[in-house]
Amino acid sequence: MTIKKLADKEISLDTQSTTVKVSYVDSFKVTVGESIIDKPGEYEIGGISVMALEVPNPDYVVVNDFVAIHSEGIDIGFLFGEKGSNKEFLKDIANIDILVVSPDLNVENVKRVITLFEPQYLVILNSKNIEDVKKSYNYPNYSEEKTLKVKDSDFPRGENIVVRPVILK
């Protein structure tokens, strides 16, 4: 699987079978092949599982605040808005191997989500202030990449997990 940044809050996942695009403008939209997912729920399309979660809001506007995608044995979570970091609504999600976040999120909220999921990769979408992002998260050994290529065997199970921070440019 190859993960690429397309825009500030738009990512593509190139899997063996199809391309998945995840974008965010006030709510997530996931495109799997020709299918578009823009409502909360659980979906299975061409061997790719998508879970779009909505954090209830007082305006009763349907908004996808967190998206999890499972493909090729890898679970990827997407967090681009502050409401999606509410741990109470994320507690039913079992594993996230890769957590993709936008750089404008509150770092303490992201750290709480990292504690909940224990991802092996933290992918931060590139921002103009890369050094500020590095200082805020306080992880050693950042790598800056144009794409992130991963496969299921890159994720040891049941071992001490070390978060590998990657900044996607």
Image (spheres, rainbow, N blue to C red):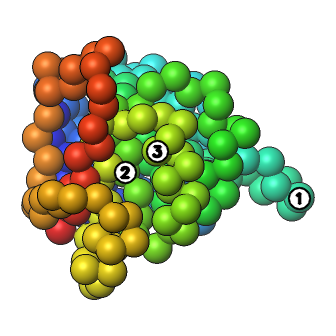
Quarter-of-image position of residue 136: bottom left
State the quadrant of the C terminus: bottom left
Residue 141 lies, with reference to residue 119, above or below; the image says below
Instruction: State if disc 1 and disc 2 touch (CB < 8 Å).
Output: no
Q: Which mark is residue 85?
A: none
On screen, residue 155 versus residue 58, left or right, reads left
Q: Residue at x 27, y 38 (%)?
A: 162
Residue 56 in percent (x, y) is at: 80, 48
State the residue at coordinates (28%, 20%): 159
x then y, percent, for residue 65 = 61, 51
Q: Amino acid at mark 1?
A: Pro
Q: Which label's residue is closer to the chain start, 2 or 1?
A: 1
Q: Is residue 38 visible?
A: no
Q: How many marks?
A: 3
Residue named by callout 3 = 114
Look at the numbered disc 2 and give the secondary structure of its residue.
strand
Percent of width and height locating residue 161: 30, 31
The amino acid type found where label 3 is placed reads Ile
Q: Residue at x 46, y 73 (%)?
A: 104
Which image quarter is the N terminus in? top left
Q: Which mark is residue 58?
A: 1
Q: 159 or 76, which lies in front?
A: 159
Question: Mark 2 — residue?
Answer: 100
